[in-house]
Amino acid sequence: MFATGDSIVAVATPPGRGGIGIVRISGPSSLEIAQAVLEHPRRLRARYATYTRVRQADRERPSRPGRAIDEVIATYFPAPHSYTGEHVVEISAHGSPVVLQAIVSVAMAAGARLAEPGEFTLRAFLSGKRDLIQAEAVADLIAAVTPLQARVAFDQLEGTLTERIREIDGQLFDLIARLEASLDFPDEGYHFIEPQETARQTTCLVEQLDRLLAGARRGRLIREGATVVVAGRPNVGKSSLFNALVGADRAIVTDIAGTTRDLVSEHVDLDGLAVTMVDTAGWREAADVVEREGVRRAARARAAADLLMVVLDRSEPMTVEDGQLLADTAAARRLVVLNKADLPASHSCSGAAVCVSARTGEGIDELRRAIARELTGSDAWRDTAAISNTRHIALLEQARDSLSAAARAAAENRAPEEFVLADLQAARVHFDEVVGARTTEDVLQHIFERFCVGK
């Protein structure tokens, strides 16, 4: 996976047909490979778009030019001024999958190897063009389905998170250097930092990490999305409310109780959050085997949900089923919704519930905001989160634990400086793992295998 001595090739644009498709060649022999397949007789000029053709080799008569495959624009990016940091040639052709695969084939015949998933970005990381946070942000930016996801990923690609970690790590490095200096000259009596000052500075680093991690839940939800399950007894308007939130008639709506037998799901952009809405069978004693299976599936969906949206009928008195559903979901993260606000009310809308009308649309915008607020735990969830990746969060939490242990030991003056220093150095190791300064091949393979081929 990590051999960089060969040259690689792949289609760098998404699968399917389009006006333009790009084939990227990267590696030490990329220019020679490109020259072998292009009709252009002279060496490609650096960073200059050259109009030419790609030709297929004539295997029977190698001395003769082969059949032309397509008219293309070829651009050569010499190292290190390219995406991967290597010599790169990008061939822009017509966006037919057949044409693009033919160009890849002739490039492979000329000496290139087909790129693995994410190998171009991996080479950018190995050549120092990107740190690991930025490399992962590339995949997140490609996978973004909401503008907020794209904004968070682009901020990390620009190095926002990297810079914040470097600031904390720089302060930690200075503290470690002073402690090591004290240990290097024990006989001379030099003491470059007192235990209480070590504790104070380490506590300050912990506080900086706490501020960075404060938005971790919000960032993870923005990056990974959330699942919201709609629950309630039959005929309270669950499916109508589901359709209103997703903006389409996805769930069947009738006056007959028990219409919804299976789970119905739809992806929706909820003001920047990627949310999977799930409509479920009504909460009641099932009348037949099919409905019983639907009720069982609804129970499993409720158990796996990030948020339960418990729907009650505001126009009717509370029923036994309503009370049991509220009792059974009391410990879960939930939002109580009183539907049918357009009808005369049988009970008032408390501050803990949201009143809506799925038929008229009254309160739907407020419901969207309430869902986002319950998921993120904040009214400021639209702010860009500095951290969103689970791997980053776990490593920074481990770094925080190491710093906290060092701060406690230094404050109580109960451990030798060597032990405090070991905790501080452990924190630095975790910082290095976040940005990729220390990373095993298994971790890199796990990260880059989720990339698409060509990126």
Image: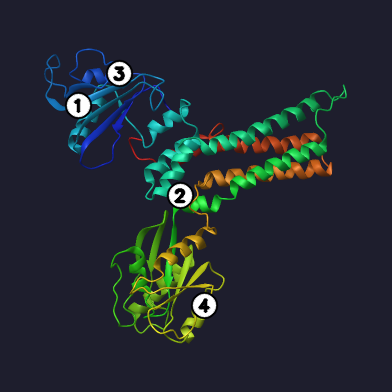
- Mark with earlier residue (4, 2): 2
Residue at 54 percent across and 53 percent down: it is 217
Amino acid tagged 3 = Leu
Q: Nearer the viewer, residue 321 or 349?
A: 349
Where is residue 343? Give x, y as percent. 38, 82
Seen in the image, is 399 located left or right of residue 198?
Answer: left
Alpha carbon separation for disc pair 4 and 1 = 64 Å
Where is residue 141? Give x, y as percent. 40, 42
- Mark with earlier residue (2, 3): 3
Callout 3: SS? helix
Quadrant location of the N terminus in the rendered image: top left
- Mark with earlier residue (3, 4): 3
Alpha carbon separation for disc pair 3 and 4 = 67 Å
* Quarter of image, res 102: top left
Disc marking residue 326:
4
Where is mark 2, residue-wise? Answer: 223
Seen in the image, is 257 located left or right of residue 182?
Answer: left
In the image, residue 351 sits, relative to residue 429, either above or below, namely below
Residue at 70 percent across and 29 percent down: it is 174
Disc marking residue 302:
none
